[in-house]
Image: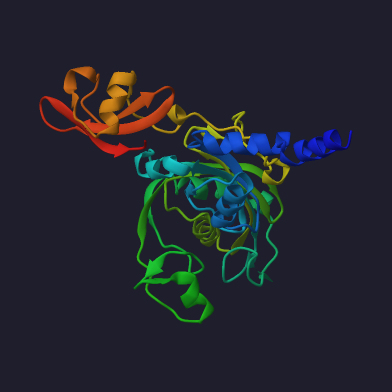
């Protein structure tokens, strides 16, 4: 009886819990994926990656398209080997829901620095002028980034110059605005839905709009709703990272929705060739351009045209 009791004790000590088994299973699986997730306000984009990596013990987590700490909304994350694929994702426009306050100003054009009231403004009385001014921004134009931004001038971030009270020449950059809609208006407050190209600063856009209306403005809220076709309405969208459990793998979004490239599905024989970085016969490919090599629903590699007879590996993820 005494021996049996000791055996039971040993069994209880070494028998792994279900939680541990789940964690071990996740560690052994191929965990390279893409994720759509909400970045909370006040978090940096890197804060989100670090939290996600720690929560699920990924080897690596990266993101596409930085959001300022005071902004919230949709971010695209990649884990492990798929972090190598951001250079191949299509540069797409991004859509933001933006809340503003006219007649006010701040050094950062938002609420991160002291906000001052300059005048009483009722946008309801200038609705026609507001709509006309908004329309002038549609299309391509040049924009000057705000001083409180991460843009580098002479190797130094602009916000560092701003905090030191130094003035620098900020080069203009080309931007494109494809949508500028008024969602709501209430006295000095206005809410917009804006779709812009990469590198566009919403704060600068709102300030430029205010100048056209002979007033000032600050941005009070920025929420990113879309990255190209990717949306917060997608079922894969993770709305709150704080509700995730480390023992349950989060819902990923399939790579075919991220990479706009032709796909070649392969068998075990071709898989062995890819492992060794071999050339593949051009006749296997349907398009004469960069192609995703799909092995059992995972990205094994990216192959690109080499010569008239072969494709060569551009990126191998095995």
- 281 left or right of 52? left
Looking at the image, residue 303 lies above or below residue 191? above
Residue at 48% x, 37% y is 32
x and y, in percent, of residue 142 in the image = 37, 56
> Would you identify the image quadrant in which residue 74 lies?
top right
Front-most of 195 and 215? 195
* Residue at the bottom extreme, as displayed: 165
Looking at the image, residue 202 lies above or below residue 119? above
Q: Is residue 203 visible?
A: yes
x and y, in percent, of residue 152 in the image = 39, 67
> Would you identify the image quadrant in which residue 261 lies?
top left
Q: Is residue 223 visible?
A: no
* Residue at the right extreme, as displayed: 1
Residue at 23% x, 29% y is 289
Residue at 72% x, 42% y is 243
Front-most of 71 and 268? 268
Looking at the image, residue 279 lies above or below residue 9? above
Residue at 45% x, 49% y is 137
Front-most of 312 and 262? 312
> Would you identify the image quadrant in which residue 276 lies?
top left
- 307 left or right of 254? left
- Tell me, what colour scheme is on the image? rainbow
Q: Quadrant of the C terminus?
A: top left
Front-most of 240 and 19? 19
Q: Quadrant of the N terminus?
A: top right
x and y, in percent, of residue 58 in the image = 54, 45
Q: How many dots with numbers?
A: 0
x and y, in percent, of residue 114 in the image = 66, 72
């Amino acid at each position: 009886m005494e021996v049996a009791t000791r055996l039971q004790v040993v069994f209880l000590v070494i028998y792994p819990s279900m939680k541990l088994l789940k964690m071990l299973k996740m560690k052994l699986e191929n965990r390279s994926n893409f994720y759509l997730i909400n970045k909370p306000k006040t978090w940096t984009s890197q804060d989100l990656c670090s939290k996600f990596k720690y929560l699920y013990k990924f080897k690596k987590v990266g993101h596409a398209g930085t959001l300022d700490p005071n902004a919230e909304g949709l971010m695209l994350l990649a884990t492990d080997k798929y972090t190598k694929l951001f250079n191949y994702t299509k540069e797409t426009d991004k859509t933001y829901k933006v809340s503003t306050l006219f007649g006010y100003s701040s050094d950062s054009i938002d609420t991160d620095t002291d906000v001052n009231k300059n005048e009483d403004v009722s946008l309801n009385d200038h609705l026609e002028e507001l709509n006309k001014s908004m329309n002038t921004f549609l299309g391509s134009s040049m924009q000057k980034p705000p001083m409180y931004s991460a843009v580098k001038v002479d190797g130094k971030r602009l916000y560092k110059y701003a905090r030191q009270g130094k003035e620098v020449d900020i080069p203009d950059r080309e931007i494109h605005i494809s949508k500028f809609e008024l969602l709501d208006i209430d006295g000095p407050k206005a809410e917009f839905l804006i779709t812009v190209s990469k590198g566009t600063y919403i704060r600068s856009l709102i300030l430029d709009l205010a100048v056209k209306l002979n007033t000032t403005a600050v941005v009070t809220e920025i929420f990113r709703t879309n990255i190209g076709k990717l949306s917060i309405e997608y079922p894969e969208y993770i709305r709150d990272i704080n509700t995730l459990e480390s023992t349950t793998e989060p819902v990923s979004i399939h790579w075919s929705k991220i990479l706009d490239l032709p796909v070649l599905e392969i068998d075990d024989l071709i898989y062995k060739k890819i492992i060794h970085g071999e050339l593949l016969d051009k006749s296997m490919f349907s398009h004469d351009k960069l192609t995703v090599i799909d092995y059992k629903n995972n990205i094994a590699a990216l192959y690109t045209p080499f010569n008239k007879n072969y494709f060569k590996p551009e990126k191998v993820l095995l």
